[in-house]
Image (cartoon, grey):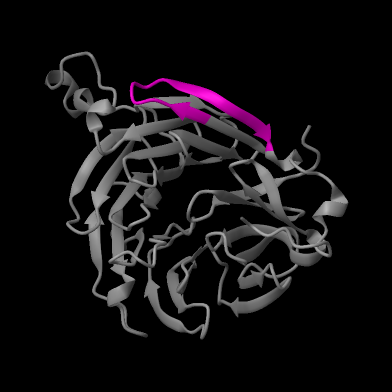
Amino acid sequence: MIRDKKVKSVRFNQDQGCFTCCMESGVRIYNIEPLVEKLHYDIDVVGSVSKCEMLFRTNLIAVVSGGAPPRFADNILSIYDISAKKKILQVVFASSIRAVRLRRDKIVVALLNQIHVFSFPTPTQRLFTLETRENYKGLCEVSPLVSAEKQILIFPGHKLGSLQLVDLCCTEISISSAPVWIAAHKAEIGCLALNQQGTRAATASIKGTLIRVWDTATKNLLVELRRGTDPATVYCINFSRDSDYLCCSSDKGTVHIFAIKNTNLNKRMTLPSGGMLGKYGESQWALANFTVPPECACICAFGPNSSVIAVCLDGTFHKYVFTSDGICNREAFDVYVNVCDDEKYLQWSTALLSLP
């Protein structure tokens, strides 16, 4: 039974092998395979936490306070070195931090109307600032791989429904590169994602019925996927590591799995396309799906061996395995907030539980 463990947000790390859990009582880090709590900073150390970003499986995490009682204001970014058990960096911004994204060489911080890019870890200096449209959700993603040809940053563009792309490799200090944007949707963008290599971007509007996948080099639409017919809030979109598949979750309580390399695997309507149905009759529906509690937000990502992980704010953990013919079976279920509840084990003062 979940006992007064209110979860404010959850987020996967860059390789989707761990996830952070921000709570009124602090922050936790969980490994996925197997599901085990690896780190716990309690309220006495970090206060209540609204956002936490891991840097792969290194000792560095970024934390933003939130909720009650916050230890710091929500315009302060704190970087902790968990091996040294101390804060190594603090940056104060003019307004509330909406999102933080980490690369091994950069920090990206989204505010309501700006995105700041800093060098990282040393020397940490602001490289440039991008002015944005009002971005309440802090929607932005950056390609995590240093080895990739391009360092792509994506976020909602100034024009309604547009997606802006910036190649951080081609950006000089204090000077932003020329804006490149894609007319992604007619309505406001509600969710976005970027694959590991920065070659594919996925977008959904606030309507939430369609997900569109784009080539970040050519700006061409690669595939349009139908989540459903009723409007929905899309919580999360993620690519598989090889970019062959895509998953998404929404407030309908269903996690959808699509094929984006071999789109013939996706389901289609049995009725003849065209005619009165128009493009609707040609829609590509999910290859497979499974359900989670619809009353709470949920993030999803791909695990090993054709599995999809869903982590919900109600403290539940779901793992399903799918096949190319659309069969989807549950492999694991747990209440992650109750995984490892030994208070002595969880104290900051105990020996460090190093991430694998």
> What residue lies at 48% left-to-right and 53% top-to-bottom?
15
Residue 10, relative to residue 135: is it above or below?
above
Residue lying furthest left: 275
Q: Is residue 149 above or below residue 307?
A: below
Inspect this view and state whether residue 46 appears. yes
Whether residue 133 appears in magenta in the rendering, the answer is no
Compared with 136, 81 (above or below) is below
> Secondary structure of the magenta portion, mostly?
strand
Q: Which quarter of the picture shows residue 53?
A: bottom right
Q: Can residue 253 be seen in this view?
A: no
**How many numbered discs, if any?**
0
Residue 323 counted in the magenta span: yes
Quadrant where the image shows the C terminus: bottom right
Q: What stretch is highlighted in magenta?
A: 320-335
Residue at left offset 17%, top offset 57%: 218
* Vertical relation: 59 (above or below) 301: below
The percent position of residue 318, horizontal first and vertical second, equals 58, 32
- Residue 316 lies left or right of residue 288; in this view the side is right
Q: Where is residue 142 in the image (x, y as percent from the top left)?
A: 40, 62
In x, y percent, where is residue 125?
48, 84
